[in-house]
Amino acid sequence: MLASNTRRIYLDNAATTQLDKRVLDEMMPYLSDCFGNASSLHSYGTQAKESLNNFRSKIASIINAQDEEIIFTSGGTEANNLTLKGIAFANRNKGNHIIVSTIEHDCILNTCKWLETQGFFITYLPVDNDGLVDIEKLKRFINPKTIIVSVMHANNEIGTVQPIAEIGGICKERNIYFHTDACQSFGKIPVDVVSQNISLMSLNAHKIYGPKGVGCLYVKKDTNIIPMLHGGGQEFGLRSTTENIAGIAGFAKAAELCSNEMNTESKRLSTLRDKIIKALQEKYDGFYINGSMMQRLPNNLNFGISGLEGETIRVLLMLDEKGIAISTGSACSNNDTTKSASHVLQAIGCDQFQARGAIRVGLGRFNTEDDIDYFIEQLTNTIKQLKPIFS
């Protein structure tokens, strides 16, 4: 239990983000007065429908899509499931081969495991030590039965940004659908579905200071895909259920804020991140970074210190007692009852010890330079407590 006067610093923005007050203000009317069902014909419904269309248009414009190509979902996991299952079963007469990278989010990898039980064949595209996919192997893996390639835009653990325009171009030349999970990158770096040759793209709100439980799937016009949910035919027949207008309002506002503030915020966050790197490099000879520093999200730092890997969980818990929240990897992976080491870190060449010993810092909008100074100070003190040899 934290003392009431303990300073609190949240550095796990890759797991989720704090709801921005401006986003909450946008949502409030749709939680009270504007409560209509967007499918109803009376004025309450038409008001909700008009708002829904406006929010859809706002998100579409940010990614250079058409309004009707935005399908609202409950978040990234649903969007990823809808993509892989919807494309797989709709295009089974064309082929049964799917390519995904080895460092995808668990919701992609677990969906692929299930699809293997349904007669589909999955090829797992390897990455190099920086976490970048092997483009030449992708070209070799594609065959006449390949129906979709899915490679995330930026990794949730190590922040590596993939060359999705190049990957999308390869798929476009071969008439194969290209999907990217952009839940980590959206709002932090530019995304353009046209110039980056994207067929389908998953987005969510809670990684961009919006509400949990809402996201969307961009589906390029004329894509052959079938729904997972059957009902009233909402979302152009691809996602039946009454739309969460309040959540979508927050999603659209959060996306707008991130888009407007992206350039200045990216520079600010990368400066804070680099300050941490510089301080730890000077203090610890064994400090190392996981993932690419050249192709990396501005707010992500995933690192280890040689000889300290076995103490990572204790570091996390001791910092938590001091009011500082960091993580050891993907929050979703903490639900893995096998407690296996990070598949992402193993894919980039880390051994089991290193893969269990990484620390992830996810910087965000509400972090200040004072927060970073405090984090560096308390991390250093914690390491001294655990490993006096490091002092």
Image: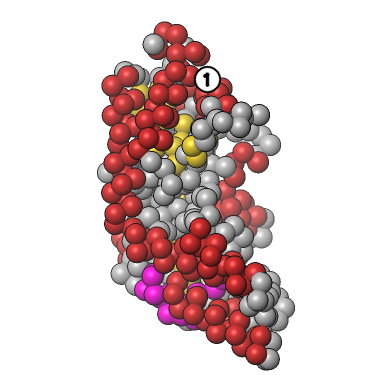
Please check the rendered image and state whether residue 64 is part of the magenta-colored stretch, yes or no. yes
Indicate the position of residue 259 as horizontal and vertical percent values. Answer: 37, 63
Indicate the position of residue 238 as horizontal and vertical percent values. Answer: 60, 76
- Quadrant of the image occupied by residue 367: top left
Q: Quadrant of the N terminus?
A: top right
Label 1 Cα crowd, 10 Å radius (few <14 / some 14-19 / many 20+): some
Indicate the position of residue 85 as horizontal and vertical percent values. Answer: 60, 65
| Residue at 54% in and 73% down | 71
Amino acid on which the number 1 mark rests in the picture: Glu
The reply to whether residue 237 is visible in this rendering is: no
Q: Which contiguous range is marked in magenta?
A: 60-72
Up/down of 19 relative to 370, above or below: below
| Residue at 49% in and 26% down | 357
The reply to whether residue 222 is visible in this rendering is: yes
Q: Which residue is mark 1?
A: 311
Up/down of 103 relative to 251, above or below: above
Please check the rendered image and state whether residue 22 is part of the magenta-colored stretch, yes or no. no
| Residue at 62% in and 38% down | 334
**Closer-to-camera residue (102/9):** 9
| Residue at 52% in and 24% down | 315
Left/right placement of residue 202 relative to residue 298 reads right
Up/down of 220 relative to 308, above or below: below
- Quadrant of the image occupied by residue 249: bottom right
Tell me how the rendering is colored: secondary structure
Residue that lies at the very extreme toward the front in this rendered image? 5
Indicate the position of residue 171 as horizontal and vertical percent values. Answer: 38, 66
